[in-house]
């Protein structure tokens, strides 16, 4: 939108093309002083759209509240691309190929926290600010579910990255197994940071995401520049691991700071036990092949989850 104040009269001129896309031209009779032009812009758009001015004010408020979330989304997108760009510039396209398969797996795993975040978001938003203790309990429950899912994924990445890459992408990607063994476990960090990000938005602290996402990107940039020249794809993987860990520490730390600590030590106990059983069974049975080993480990994990009631609230 392009609004020009001090016009002879207020009116919507129309849409014109520009190098950056379509632009809505608006002329405003008010001067750009003490918010007069902004108020006149709302009134002019209200008349043009046939919408009450108070509704436009609501939409404007929602738009500005959404800016931090959009910014964080851009930073996370850059986080997924930055290592690959630097890797290609510093070590060549071959290293990028080995590394990119791990990133593709990680991108696919982002569906897990998105589904849980979308499921919990209405409840989190409804409980703020009327029932802070209930909101904390819901946040704790979501973190518990993500720990139950994320810890086996992390164990699988550490123990089975090489046979997994060979099975899914082919033997040609075997040199990327070292990077995959670091990148895939970062899914655990990603699961929890994504849900903490959603919680911060629901408690009207979305501006914090500008800080947390920027710092995570800076951690990734600095460590990638340090590690990639000497270690290639593995260096990029460790930079990504550290950046995702930093993002989790910051986002979950701020949720706790604003009064919604999930009591991490108690929360971790039963999911960690189930995850440890998954890892032990997977490691012991990998000689049978990746698919049978994964099935056996998953069954053992499910038995422990049921036996411990690991999805339930701690007593």
Image (cartoon, rainbow, N blue to C red):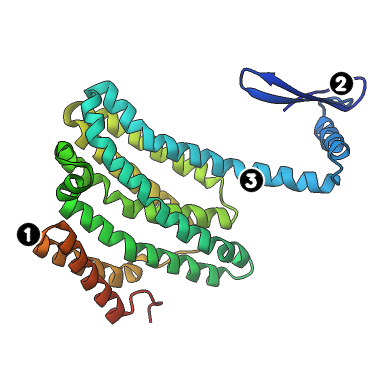
Coordinates of residue 3 in the picture (x, y in percent) = 78, 25
Rendered residue at 66%/42% (across/down): 64
Q: Residue furthest right?
A: 8
Residue 274 sits in quarter:
bottom left
Counting other residues with Cα less than 10 Å from the Cα at mark 3, is it few (<14), some (14-19), or many (20 or more)?
some
> Between residues 311 and 223, which one lies in front from this camera angle?
311
Which residue position holds label 3?
A: 65
Rendered residue at 45%/41% (across/down): 213
Task: Look at discs 3 and 1 and give the one toward the viewer.
Answer: 1
Helix, strand or loop status at disc 2: loop
- Which mark is drawn over residue 6? 2
> Between residues 193 and 102, which one lies in front from this camera angle?
102
Rendered residue at 33%/46% (across/down): 106
State the separation of the CA atoms marked 3 and 1.
Answer: 53 Å
Q: Left or right: 93 with respect to 67?
A: left
Coordinates of residue 195 in the picture (x, y in percent) = 45, 56
Which residue position holds label 1?
A: 287
Q: The N terminus appears in which quarter of the rendering?
A: top right
Coordinates of residue 180 in the picture (x, y in percent) = 22, 44
Q: The C terminus appears in which quarter of the rendering?
A: bottom left
């Amino acid at each position: 939108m392009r609004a020009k104040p001090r016009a002879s009269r207020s009116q919507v001129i129309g849409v014109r093309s520009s190098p950056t896309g379509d632009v809505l031209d608006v002329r405003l009779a008010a001067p750009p002083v003490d918010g007069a032009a902004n108020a006149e812009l709302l009134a002019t758009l209200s008349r043009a759209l046939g919408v009450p001015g108070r509704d436009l004010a609501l939409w404007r408020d929602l738009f500005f509240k959404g800016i931090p979330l959009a910014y964080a989304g851009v930073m996370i997108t850059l986080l997924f691309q930055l290592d690959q760009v630097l890797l290609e510039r510093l070590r060549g396209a071959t290293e990028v190929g080995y590394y990119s398969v791990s990133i593709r797996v990680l991108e696919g795993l982002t569906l897990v926290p998105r589904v849980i975040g979308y499921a919990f978001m209405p409840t989190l938003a409804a409980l703020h600010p009327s029932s802070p203790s209930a909101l904390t309990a819901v946040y704790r429950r979501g973190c518990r579910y993500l720990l139950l899912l994320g810890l086996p994924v992390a164990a699988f990445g550490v123990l089975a990255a090489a046979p997994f890459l060979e099975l899914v992408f082919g033997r040609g990607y075997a040199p990327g197994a070292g990077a995959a063994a670091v990148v895939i476990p970062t899914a655990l960090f990603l699961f929890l940071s994504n849900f903490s990000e959603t919680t911060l938005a629901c408690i009207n602290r979305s501006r914090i995401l500008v800080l947390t996402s920027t710092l995570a990107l800076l951690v990734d940039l600095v460590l990638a520049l340090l590690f990639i020249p000497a270690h290639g794809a593995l260096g990029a993987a460790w930079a990504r691991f550290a950046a995702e860990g930093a993002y989790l520490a910051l986002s979950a730390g701020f949720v706790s700071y604003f009064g919604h600590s999930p009591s991490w030590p108690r929360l971790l106990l039963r999911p960690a036990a189930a995850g440890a059983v998954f890892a032990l069974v997977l490691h012991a049975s990998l000689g049978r092949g990746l698919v049978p080993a994964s099935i056996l480990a998953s069954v053992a994990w499910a038995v422990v989850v049921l036996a411990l009631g690991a999805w339930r609230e701690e007593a």
